[in-house]
Image (cartoon, rainbow, N blue to C red):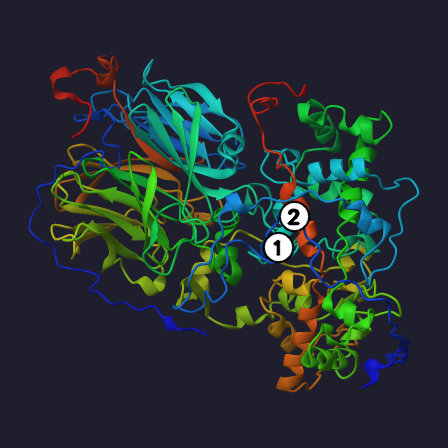
Amino acid sequence: MWYKSRFLSFGCSVGGVLCLLVAVQTFSNTSGVLESDQNFDASQAFGPGDVKEGYESEEYRTHSRSLLERRGVKQDLIRYVEDPPLGLPQVVLPEENPITRKKIDLGRKLFFDRRLSINNTLSCAVCHIPEQGFTNNEISTAVGVEGRSVLRNAPTLFNIAYQEHLFLDGREISLENQVWQPITARNEMAAPSIGYVIKKIRKIQDYDGLFEAAFDSRGPDIATIGFALASYQRTLLSGNSPFDRWFYGGQIDAISESAKNGFEVFSGKGQCIVCHRVQEDHALFVDHDFHNTGIGFAVSTGKSSATDNLTTRVQLAPGIFADVPNQTILSVSRNRNTNDLGLYRITENPNDRWKFRTQTLRNIALTAPYMHNGQFNTLKEVIQFYNEGGIPNELLSPFIRPLNLSESEISDLEEFLLTLTGSNVPDLVADAFAAEIGDIGTEDPKWPHKNTLGF
Amino acid sequence: MMKRIIYLAMAAVIPLASVFTVKADETCMSPYIAKITGQEDYVYVWTLGVEGIGDEQDKLVTIDANPSSDTYGTVVNVLSVGGRNEAHHSGLSDDRKYLWAGGLDTNQIFIFDIHSDPRTPTLHKVITDFTDKSGGLVGPHTFYALPGRMLVTALSNNVDHGGRTGMAEYNNAGEFIATHWMPTDSDLRGATKSGQFADGYGYDVRVKADMNVMLTSSFTGWSNYMMDFGQMLQDGAAMQRFGNTMIVWDMHARQPKKVLDVPGTPLEIRCAWDPSNRYCFTSTALTSQIWLIYEDDQGEWQAKAVADIGDPSSIPLPVDISITSDDKGLWVDTFLEGKARYYDISDPHAPKQVYEKVIGKQINMVSQSWDGKRVYFSSSLLGNWDKLGDDDEQYVKLYHWDGEQLDHKWTVDFYAEGLGRAHQMRFGSYALYGKINPNTKLAKIDEIKVNGGLN
């Protein structure tokens, strides 16, 4: 089998683009054992505590976890940046924001602080939930302040340090800049201004001295808040997956034969690797580019399957569904513009319509639902979508075409994708669980009723 | 995948039965609250602020309900509280001097003084640290008085904004006492899981004080109740996150005893008043059924569906119920139909619908007077669930009920008045505080009786 070779390279050309050069290199194996602290129940790291597996069936049984068990153990996250897990490259740090433990700690505190939103209800972590793959498994598209609709599925923050383009339309260039958009976006955390947030943080006593300690006596400001949040997010590096241990670590039994077959499909007949790239010494499973799969086109042009029917099947309880007239659904749907033109919104180049950033496949088992609008709940649905060649439109990516994968190839491909879960996920989640959630307390200024903010 | 489609199993409409002896009361109140047994003077309406309407913020609206007053059927006071907090339910303190009202979004609890001047309530206290103090509860919902205490059920939590939650207990001074978490599979807290579910969700609370029994029901988390309703109905992942349980508690010990399966989202709980009637009712919002929660011959608490509400397959969405004081009748409001139904529950195991009337294009709460002759209806369900355009009627309406039909008396149009979305209604009276309504031409003190304690 070719993937057992120590070194192997191949190239492929799709649409005239040299797409890949892969080399398999064997590194010394890592332990392969979950690195989490023994005091942390690692199983909590792999999905919502409110388990809904099998909910479609009337045989469904709950396996819900108590929220009181959601207790973590603080980790020394800087080690991942200093020495990334197997399968990941070195992190390129911005010159103006070298990483430190104090910045990471401060960034973590900000990340979980719901007081950064206008009405103290939303933090970054409400949409990027640690045990849900730092995304939200429970809804397709994000919900912001006062329930305002966000068009897109919250992307995972695992390995966000490597993204060259931030947001699914790529509109930001650095994590330091990016952090301000969700905080001030009206349909996300809705802080009325950057100055408002700075002023608010300065008034919250439990931040006293933290910025000054992390930033050489410099207090909270537009730069230091961005630096701190970026520093924390940059540590969410997740690798050393079974795939990494097999592919880069030479551990032959790290993944199943089915998964190995799946990787062959991934790299060959499926051509997934064209966009979800695997390099000689690391794999980010992204190409830092944007592609039109047809999903955005279908929504914008009313060609999605939902609009073809008169009813929509809605689940009411385990095993109980109803076909609800779309007219009924429309009667309670806000005037929500679901058009999402993706990259075009940034470039205004008509050729960029409905293009979205390639998303990483690392930890893909943990980051459902899938696609930019979260329209698929399972990996099998995603594979089937690509197997059928996406949704035809004049700007459909030339990389997307019917694949004619067999059922066994689809199964193998899914099996392969399940090997991409990093071994340190429990550590990252344990650390997140240990973070204090910032809720408005009696010591905080009661800004709704007293003019303590000074506005 | 689709196991079964719900269908109409029970007869929906039964011909009008004989005239009922309806004594009715403020039957959704705690038995520990002083009651208005005569003519109520005011209806306090906890009202959601709406962008573009008036001052756009939540408010307590006071409507003159005394027909002897010159301002009968009109708004006589508006008290704005700041913010759109997702105003929802409210509840009276055991001495009925204060009205506690919650914001499902911002977790603020507004305590209004309604006794100093019942016509002009004032804001006595605002609890801003509900989430912080309770250990992470989100969405204060039901405010239910026990002696010297206020139980506050929650709908969600601050870690994933899902449905796992609990109840907070406060004293009458508004000081936090304790959190009582809902049982989950991993921590049943001493309860018995009697069926398939122990989801840990919460919604309403009611007691059968004579039996030392407390019941709670289950709805959904912040992500869903704040989300656009139409969007949510089409979100398969979101629709899996509704409650399917009710909990039987030891009231005095606050100890959960038994988890009952009540699939389809059981909401409001109304208990029979007669000590010999050892049961309560609820309605399931999604599966549109009336459920009986009762003590069987062996002394075990059980739950069973006893009637369909309209055509469940069309999801009429029953949202509020109200039992009569003689335990013979049950009002049921269905939001999507805008309809009020009256059921004969003389046989609690076989409720029969005997009357129905469309109240508006949408409907939510129902509150009836002590004598059952006056029935008030309000319109708003949730800020992002209400209907749109011309269907988005916002009102409080008074009807007189003669045992056979509802007779419309007046409507306050909450949009025309620049107020917002009308949600829950609570009654106020001068007589409760030994005062005479100075606004009535003919104050008849002897017709107004105050009856405190157990009834």
Residue B439, by quadrant, is: top left
Residue B262 in the image, given as x and y percentages of width and height:
32, 56
Residue B337: which quarter of the image? Answer: bottom left
Outermost right residue = A95
Residue type at numbered disc 2: Ala
The amino acid type, in three-letter code, at marker 1 is: Ala
Determine whether label 2 and label 1 are within 8 Å by CB. Answer: yes
Q: How many marks?
A: 2
Question: Can residue B126 be seen?
Answer: yes
Instruction: Read off the chain for label 1.
Output: A
As helix, strand or loop, the secondary structure at mark 1 comes to: helix
Could you tell whether B97 is left or right of B354 in the image? right
Against B269, is B42 above or below?
above
Picture quarter with the N terminus of chain A: bottom right
Q: Residues within 10 Å of mark 1 (few under 14, many from 20)?
A: some
Q: Chain of mark 2?
A: A
Would residue A173 be visible to someone looking at this image?
no
Q: Position of residue A353 (x, y in %)?
A: 76, 64
Q: Nearer the viewer, residue B324 or B413?
A: B324
Q: Position of residue A154 (x, y in %)?
A: 66, 54
Q: Is residue B360 above or below residue A14?
A: above
Q: Quadrant of the C terminus of chain A?
A: top right
Q: Is residue A122 left or right of residue B41?
A: right
Classify mark 2: helix, strand or loop: helix
Q: Residue at x 70, y 69 (%)?
A: A419
- As drawn, the label of residue A430 is 2
Query: Which residue is at 43% across, 64% downward?
Result: A315
Q: Residue furthest left?
A: B18
Which residue in the structure is indicated by mark 1? A42
Density class for disc 2 (Cα within 10 Å; few <14, some 14-19, many ≥20) is: many
| Above/below status of A14 relative to B120 | below
